[in-house]
Image (cartoon, coloured by chain):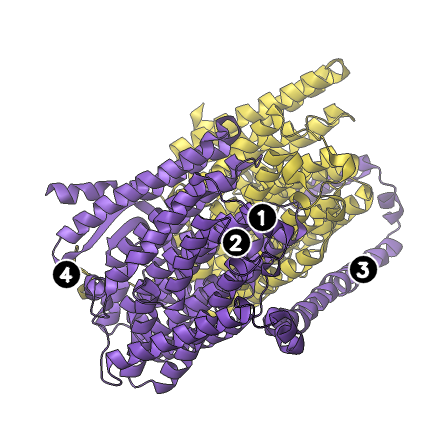
Amino acid sequence: MTAHILTLTTFLPLAGVIVLLAGGRRLGDQTTKAIALLTTVATFVISLVILGRFDSAATGFQMIERYSWVKSIGLSYLLGVDGVSLWMVLLTTFLMPLAVLASWHIEKDVRRYMLAMLILEISVVGSFLALDLLLFFVFFEALLVPMYLLIGGWGGERRVYAAVKFFLYTMAGSAFLLLAILFLYSKSGAAGHATFDLRSLMSVAGGLPAGTTRWLFLGFFIAFAVKVPLFPLHTWLADAHTEAPTAGSVLLAAVLLKVGAYGLIRFNLALFPEAAKYFASFVSVLAVIGIIYGAVCAIMQTDIKRLVAYSSVSHLGFVVLGIFAFTHQGMTGGVLQMVNHGLATGALFLVVGMVYDRTHTRQLGELGGLAGVTPWLAGAFLFAVLASVGLPGLNSFVGEFLVIVGTFSVSHWFGSLAAVAVVLSAIYLLWSYQRLAYGPVHEEHRGLPDLSVREVAILAPILGLILVFGVAPRLLTDKIQPTANAVVARVDPAHPRDAAPILAPAAAPAPGTAP
Amino acid sequence: MTPAASAFHYLWLIPALPLAGAAVNLFFGKRLGKLSGVLASATLGAAFLLSALLVKDLMALPGDGRLVVRHLFDWISVGNLTVAADLRLDQVSAIMILVVTGVGALIHVYAIGYMHGDPRTGRFFAYLNLFVFFMLMLVLGENLLLLYLGWEGVGLCSYLLIGFWFDRPEASVAAKKAFITTRIGDTFMLVGLALIVAKFGTLDFTAIFHATAAGGIAKGTATAIALLLFAGAIGKSAQVPLHVWLPDAMAGPTPVSALIHAATMVTAGVYLVVRMHPIFELSGVALTVVLVVGLVTAIFAGTCAFGQDDIKRVLAYSTISQLGFMFMAVGMRAYAAAMFMLVAHAFYKALMFLGAGSVMHGTHDATDMRTFGGLLKPMPITGVTFLIGAAAQAGVPPLAGFFAKDAILEIANHTGRELVYVLGTFAALLSAAYIGRLVFLTFFGEPRSQEAAHAHESPPVMWIPLAVLAAGALVAGWLNLTPEGRLAGFLEPVAGAVPGGSGLAVPVMDAIAIAITLSALIAAWYTFASGRVDWLAVRERFQPLQRVLQNGWYVDRAYQTVLVEPARAFAHITAFVVDTKIIDGLVNAIGAGVKRLASVGRRVQTGYVRTYALAIGLGVVALMFWVGVRG
């Protein structure tokens, strides 16, 4: 069974889908929710087997599963995991049960809601594990549907506008992706062996003229840049985040955006290293603009979900900046930051959802004094805020620090400008905390209940991990590093860059002596 | 291994004790009730005893071998960069942990009385303990990232504690202002850390100092690093131009002001520069910047302190001014003098803050000195201990402040910095004058309000810490009777020899200093307590000046007009014009255009989700089909 662990992890939620479909309307809402929870928990447990079997020292793909699917066109069912996708998969399977739990109060059309959640998990995990470009594309497109349904079906007032916008934006990006994939595929056919296998296409792309690879790079890039989202392709995000139900916002921020950043590493850098280097400054400028711009926009938001959405634009800028610095610290920091952002922003959306469940408002102006009424809820919000502002000791700091250090050695300007986010994030996030938790309580909010057992069960694991990864980030980075370093080396084989120079051994001090 | 060496295994316990106290109080504070303060104080008492034990062991080591580094675990390790959780005990951190745990323990005990009856004491002591944990990490960290962890951590606790009474609007505003203002400095500091990594490949103090000594970096790089780090110090230690947060921070409970905004956190900037002095010395220019900032701040804040009516705000500006003195010392390479002043100041300023808190406790939270008067009689212990603290700050010999300030001015004079000496003496005159004004307005003369007339002394749990701190302020001078004194000798292996030279003879300078102090105090007495001057009328006549000083030279208002408002307007345009109108407007326009073009667009707008699911499904099938035909 462990030989097919990747397939098992990807398609275990399908068992839940089948049960829900077979059960039909006979299943009560509670049973439906229980089945979804059970399925997602089981999937998480199974995914831990991947972690256990993962060989930290290896740089290539592991636990590969390959079956020829449509032989005539060279389409194969090809899954594999490395140090980057490992954590993306685990992040997804970890958050899914929490997202299901956070949807416990859903009453409308529960069965369809949970079906969408489970299908979403399949398509996201599939996207992270697929090494066949067409298979990836199918998963990548498929994840649009359940997310679209979640926003459009269970969202806020402007849900239809937000859902359609989300859908069209991403579809437009995907069109370029599909064209680029098909072009590469035709080139592989011309080279004698038509295939969608990423590993084979890497050498096919290596044989193409530089001009061609740059166009192809852009084709992939647009699709992923929309997903990340990178400035100026970000405007779908605020609407989608704001209108989505809590679980939708959580998964959108924590997982779906990561598909974009992941795609940049997995496909753009692997297939077109030369073009990646060529466009590095351009992408870095967009990332830096996004970091500042997202933060500045966040400062002005009065809707707390919009505020968190814009903070994602800023934080994902960090991820992309780190990736495109092409240094060991930048790359590992960027990937680490993908996980960190998933946890920190996921936690923020979860708490904001709990606030909304109680107060039925997302407007900061209509909130206040919750630190006195619901101290634990306010405390949880503060904890998530502190993780997001990069407080040392919590997870995001390590990622941000590595990105800044990794970028600074390449460009002092990019590194320094990114550091400005340290102040800006403090401004908008502490402002939101102040508005929500401090000041006088609104009369109608008196006597609101504090965290329930279910809510503690949702928040404790995610807040716990935020602390654990802040103190012991090596739990993550030791497994990310070999893959990240290999990616850096592929982009610039001659000089793999490290932000930290090694001092001459003579400089090493004798232990125990004062300087 | 000697028994003394093995005791250092427990170095980690010093920060761990308050951390454990914080955790217990955070989760079980409600259930602990009154015990929460006792528990918090006990963890600090234990940490202090352990610190004293370890410092004694450290002193037993030979003078140039007094450095203990304990490796706990590797925190970050990526590429060539490894940052370990290592604790460092040397002469500088030894002094710091004694001050932090010692003064901290006294303030914790005092807070038991001060916070009595507050429904959220568990939270309060959790934050207070957490603060001490971060402060200890700041001074014990063997690398700049651990220092930065402590640095940000104390900033967080400061934020939480200033805003502790969050239902008061001024408290929550002040809390945010403090956090954001100091974070402006921290941003530069973070860039400085990145620069250090880029140049040294490490953040470990020992390795950095070694490489610096070996000529590992250029002078210009050293200047850049030093100034970036100093920007962090300017924020944290409330120096001009980032001083604006500290006076407002007085909205927090008074024990917080004493612990965080007088004795410990605000001195972190001084500690940072002392710790990193090899880089500052290599730069040279950076030390001059430190000196100028310190001098400007000392005078500037001294004038502001003179214009305040709120007793806590006087002490806040006084703290800023005294920190300026410490930076002056550091800027003249007189690190031992700076550390001496840091210790002495921790005693007498904590004492005065707690005394002010005791006054507030006895007068139903009054803070306006215009309503005080004659409090010495109803509050004798508070009054006498406060007088000791005030005398120490004013520079009355043989109290600590006299030696500390004198040592700094003497070095200025003996190293040929005549201007620094003169201006520094002026700042000393100011500090004696405003503290005299505070004392005479508060404790002498006739009561000027009902509260003052009916004031009562605080309970023993509050005045015992006052007495202990007063004793400390009395004997702290003994630490360093001369610039070549004990503390300087203890610090010499780390800080180098005290700079010397020639100038005015020491007795002459002592005489000048004493004369200035006494004349300032006498003038203050004559004006505010002798009853022979109608000081309110005088004040009326100097109304514009008074108002300028009271408002801190309107720096806050200037920042608001020149920086905050334009920035807000910029953000508004970015968010609501550029983003919603231009970028998103463009997107929507394209969307609308496409919709009109496509005949199926109508179906898309209907919102039937199945249509989309079907569209995707059909799309994928069509794609496979197309590929299949080609293959």
The residue type indicated by label 3 comes to Ile
Label 4 crowd bin: few (<14), some (14–19), many (20+), radius 10 Å: few
Contact (Cβ within 8 Å) of mark 3 with mark 4: no
Q: Earlier in the sequence, mark 2 or mark 1?
A: 1
Mark 3 — on which chain does it sit? B
Quadrant housing residue A33? top right
Tag 1 secondary structure: loop
Disc sitting over residue A240 in the figure = none
The residue type indicated by label 2 comes to Leu
> Looking at this view, is B392 or A136 the one in front?
B392
The residue type indicated by label 1 comes to Thr
The N terminus of chain B, quarter of image: top left
Mark 1 — on which chain does it sit? B
Label 2 crowd bin: few (<14), some (14–19), many (20+), radius 10 Å: many
Residue position for label 2: B375
The colour chain B appears in is purple
Residue position for label 3: B590
- The verdict on a common chain for dots 3 and 4 is yes
Q: Earlier in the sequence, mark 3 or mark 4?
A: 4
Residue position for label 4: B64
Contact (Cβ within 8 Å) of mark 2 with mark 1: yes
Q: Disc 2 or disc 3, which is closer to the eye?
A: 2
Label 3 crowd bin: few (<14), some (14–19), many (20+), radius 10 Å: few
Contact (Cβ within 8 Å) of mark 4 with mark 1: no
Identify by letter the chain in yellow: A
